[in-house]
Amino acid sequence: MGKLTTAKVRNAKPGYGGDGKPVKRSYQDGDGLFLLVGPSGARSWMLRLQVDGRRRDIGLGAVDVDGLGRGAFDPDDQRFAELPLMLRKSLSLAEAREKAAALRKLAKAGKDPKVERDRQRVKVPTFAEAVTEAHEALCKGWSARTAKAFKASLEEHANPKLGSFKVDAIGSAEVITALAPIWTDKPVMARKVRSRIGQVLAFAKARGWRKDALPDARELRTGLSKQSRGGNFAAMPYGEVPAFVEGELAKGTAASRYAVLFAILTGARSGEVRKATWEQIDLEARIWSRDESVMTKTGISHVVTLSDAAVALLDRYTPKGLREGLIFRGARGGPLSDMSLTKAMRSAGRAETVHGFRSSFRDWAAEKMPTIPAMVAEMALAHRVGTSTEQAYLRSDLRDMRRSLIEAWGRFAAPSLSGIAGNVTPLKQRA
């Protein structure tokens, strides 16, 4: 039984200092529970505990003066049924003892009593709200492109199904429902959305908004149909590339068509080609230099070596007096849209993507240039190579070897631009 009574709590007074002014005074009930009376006479409850060898003082709430005589389980008190004890900001003596006992028990079990006291106070957001919160918190470490794609993909493909759910109520079944409409029709995007949903839920768990584990990957696979193989960018077999290039060269010099051809000959991503400017090109040195702002995929500057075929393509496309600003302009003078390059492929009767030509180049390099290390082809595609340790020791960009490889690719893919009579790939004998 505690030392305090309802009468003592009701009549408790503050203390007085040497100057006669009122000061805060504490009254002990027992088992670490204290009544605090401030200089103004305001009363509150405080629990003192030892947690991990350190003293912790935990506020429990104000004293409910009007309800001091009420027990902890008053059946006539409707708020008891509606509001959990941990959330009450005004407590009777009995309620303060009950709350203190519960927190002592949690502390003995290794829990943080303050966290447990506040756990039920956490406002659990909806998935749509959590997407915004996660985006704002995490985007600081991302590129602008990644941040934009993260939010846009979730707003388009996840929020329609998950947006109104509280993040602590989302399990495998809800995620499967959100992914099902795009799982087979847009497999690449679907996998990205699945990963980003997981990021949002992991963020929610870290913020204390959900207690359950994240949806199990095996359950998600079981609940979704099998995706067809080749869910990556459709690529043209490299043996068909020369005929495609020659066929496109026989047509007019449309910006989108020549942008596709330039992407093929350089192994560049379509976005890098669409943003390419003459200021980045050095025809004398035969290089195309892109800084970090252009390399949105990697965020690392990169230099492309230009083959005879690539230089000839640029010469054919733009007269010397007009070589400034964007190389490939849209109808309104700005950059081409990604769809314009796709349209050029469809107009040529091909279903492959422009990005897929990077795979065509990589397959050709592996099969037709076996004496060139695989690392060289990867670096030509602006891929990171090797482990972090290997990258630290690799100070060269292997530009001479990349130049030899990309020149051979130009001769293979566009023999007419390379100044050779047929589709022949000359291989130099190594000493």
Image (tube, rainbow, N blue to C red):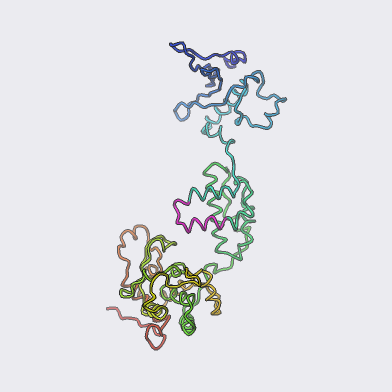
Q: Residue at x 54, y 45 (%)?
A: 205
Find the residue positioned furthest to the bottom.
Answer: 421
Residue 318 vertical placement versus 87 (above, below):
below
Residue 15 in sight: yes
Task: Give percent across and percent down for residue 8.
Answer: 59, 13
In the picture provided, is 400 more to the left or to the right than 166?
Answer: left
Q: Residue at x 46, y 26 (%)?
A: 55
Find the residue positioned furthest to the left.
Answer: 431
Residue 128 is one of the magenta-drawn residues: no
Nearest to the observer: residue 146 or residue 184: 146
The number of callouts visible is 0
Residue 363 in sight: no
Q: Which residues are the magenta region?
A: 139-154
Task: Give percent across and percent down for residue 313.
Answer: 41, 79
Q: Quadrant of the C terminus?
A: bottom left
Task: Give percent across and percent down for residue 183.
Answer: 60, 62
